[in-house]
Image (spheres, rainbow, N blue to C red):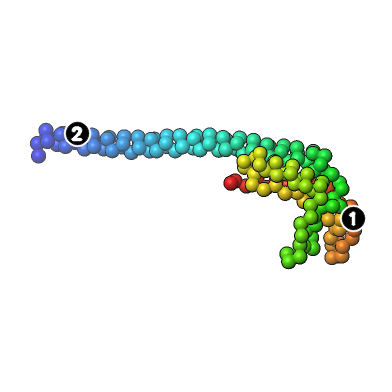
Amino acid sequence: MKLQAKLLLLFLACGVFILAAMGMLLFSQLKNDQIAILQNEVAKQLENLDFAMAAFFDEAKNDIRALAADRTVRSRDDSGFTSFLNADETTFVYRMGPLEKRIVDILNTFRNTHPYVNSVYMGRVNAFEQTEGGRQTEGGPDWGWPSAGAMPG
């Protein structure tokens, strides 16, 4: 083999080696750059999602506080309210008094004016408390906050 052919072969081998090495390095760098861009975009989207969810739950919390601040909803006189504790599906008749009707109207208005809410309900704790021993003792009512069921839909 002539010296010229050997030099040409050596030159081609070096060129292929350098191109392969540079190609692998550039491919690796390009892959790392793409991963970094993707991580940055995901982080931005997560920040936006966090902001949106925090705003949504703050709004829901404030809506519930507004409902709970309503004098009609906070009324302590629940003697005329329908009790579902011992309801029998065959004999139950729903008898809604005027105060209960006003509260139902308030909660229904809330449901109708909030598109992300498909049901609103309010519960009060019975005047009986369950003790550790399994017997019931009479106690005062626990006046809690009304609850808004926020379901997509």
Could you tell which of marks 1 and 2 lies nearer the N-terminus?
Answer: 2
Tell me what residue is drawn at x 42 percent, y 36 percent: 34
- Compared across the picture, whether 9 is left or right of 146 comes to left
* Residue 35 % position (x, y): 44, 38
Marks 1 and 2 close (CB-CB < 8 Å): no
* Residue 19 % position (x, y): 27, 35
- Compared across the picture, whether 137 is left or right of 29 comes to right
SS at badge 1? loop
Look at discs 1 and 2 and give the one toward the viewer: 1
Q: Quadrant of residue 53?
A: top right
Q: What amino acid type is highlighted by mark number 2? A: Phe
* Residue 140 % position (x, y): 89, 52
Q: Nearer the viewer, residue 68 or 12?
A: 68
Q: Nearer the viewer, residue 88 or 3?
A: 88
Tell me what residue is drawn at x 74 percent, y 42 percent: 106
Q: Residues within 10 Å of mark 2 (few under 14, many from 20)?
A: few
Residue 57 can be seen in this image? no
Q: Nearer the viewer, residue 25 or 107?
A: 107
Tell me what residue is drawn at x 73 percent, y 66 percent: 90
Residue 139: numbered disc: 1
Q: Nearer the viewer, residue 141 or 82?
A: 82
Tell me what residue is drawn at x 66 percent, y 42 percent: 112
Task: Give the labeled residue for mark 2.
Answer: 11
SS at badge 2? helix
Give me the C-alpha separation between circle 1 and circle 2. 96 Å
Q: Residues within 10 Å of mark 1 (few under 14, many from 20)?
A: few
Residue 51: numbered disc: none
- Compared across the picture, whether 13 is left or right of 128 comes to left
Q: Quadrant of the N terminus?
A: top left
Q: What amino acid type is highlighted by mark number 1? A: Gly
